[in-house]
Image (cartoon, rainbow, N blue to C red):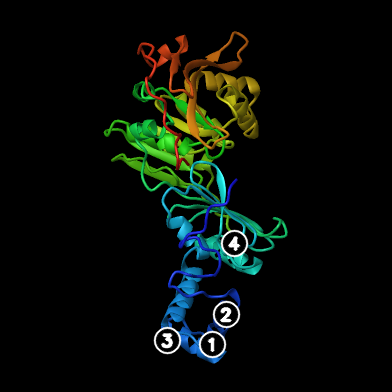
Amino acid sequence: MNAHPPSAALDGRSTSALDGASVSAELLERVRGTLALTGAKPTPAHVAAALRADGTICGDAMVLAVVTALRREALGAGPLDTLLAEPGITDILVNGPDEVYIDRGRGLERVFVRTGDEPAIRRLATRLAAAAGRRLDDATPYVDVRLSDGTRFHAVLAPVAAPGTCLSLRVPSRHVFTLDALVTAGALPPAGTPILRDLLDSRLAFLISGGTGTGKTTLLNSLLSLADPSERLVLVEDASELRPDHPHVVRLEARPPNIEGTGEISLRDLVRQALRMRPDRLVVGEVRGAEVVDLLTALNTGHEGGCGTIHANSASDVPARLEALGALAGLTREALHSQVASALHAVIHLARSTDGVRRITEIRTFTRHPTGQVTTDPAVEFHPNGTINLLPAAHLFTNRPHPARPTNDPQPGLAGAA
């Protein structure tokens, strides 16, 4: 992981250098204290008065820099605001004071951003959690919420986290990737586009598998955007991330319990409600718990074309992963495999190579054996050189012939995948 060279937007030499003036953390803390004592808002006039009371000689640039820094602390993501606004960044990670990493789709790289000391990071984490209606303190030292702009925010306070309070922000894509855009990015060979379209048009139920940050949500967004405009899509998510470009989308978002331990709305509750909302496609953003039972039940009772994402190391591991999730709901191994055999048809797997490139690697279909156990069979293989291999199992959803070998090398993989 290489450090990103400092720029005007990412300069770590001061708390705020946006207005040409350097503001030290100590000066900012003294001004903040003065304003807190008087109850004044961080307006230019009040900040200028606080600086004069502090004995600091400054010009207009310094006053505006302090105002910008204080307002950013009060309203935005503090020193991380610049990174959140920078195109191409998918993840921002803070590992304690002044240790910040970002991901532009090519792996983690360190950037020079002055975050302030441990109390400053803790204040930022607490404020962002409170803005999302969640509590973050020593009694509840971790939180996972969606911010108002769609950013997924996770925090763990010190000393539970070391070397200090750790923040993780997953930045939503500012636009929906089309399949053609995925081809341009190198995440999908050109011959793979019609195959994915065939899979969607067949209305078979499928899952998209992969590890964290491999682009599962990005690909699901792309596919759902291709669904027939006459279809009604009902999306069920723990934190709303899917934004398909489709005219008829209904979103249901889970809610954690409040401080009294009441008011929780689980994914399982929402899947049940979604079934009563006449979905043409039922979509579970991430299958991660007991809701798998209700999803499989729905797909077994006439709800075609359902889909979702699931964390798995490989497509062949998906049945075992589903088995583990079914156990959380008290479903036996035999019952789970029976449900999967009738409910699911295919799984699309994505992987991230050592150079940070995200690619679709294969499509597999589910097969039930005489023993009752379900496994996956390879149907389409996507190779890093841009070629694809169609296997007999692919005829479940496509009749396309084996594509010709491409003449050009593929471009770098998908950047900005979620």
Label 1, residues with CA under 10 Å away: few <14, some 14-19, many ≥20: few
Q: Earlier in the sequence, mark 4 or mark 2?
A: 2
Q: Earlier in the sequence, mark 1 or mark 2?
A: 2
**What amino acid is labelled 1 in the image?**
Thr
User: Residue beneath label 1, please?
Assistant: 56
Q: Residue furthest left?
A: 230
Where residue 244 appears, as percent x and y from the top left, is 36, 40
- Check disc 4 and report its element: helix, strand or loop: loop
Mark 4 vs mark 1: give the one in front.
1
Q: In the image, what residue occupies the spot 65% across and 25% down? A: 332
**What amino acid is labelled 2 in the image?**
Leu
Label 3, residues with CA under 10 Å away: few <14, some 14-19, many ≥20: few
Marks 4,2: beta carbons within 8 A:
no
User: Residue beneath label 2, please?
Assistant: 27
Where residue 62 appears, as percent x and y from the top left, is 46, 79
Q: Point out the image quarter for the N terminus.
A: top right
Mark 1 vs mark 3: give the one in front.
1
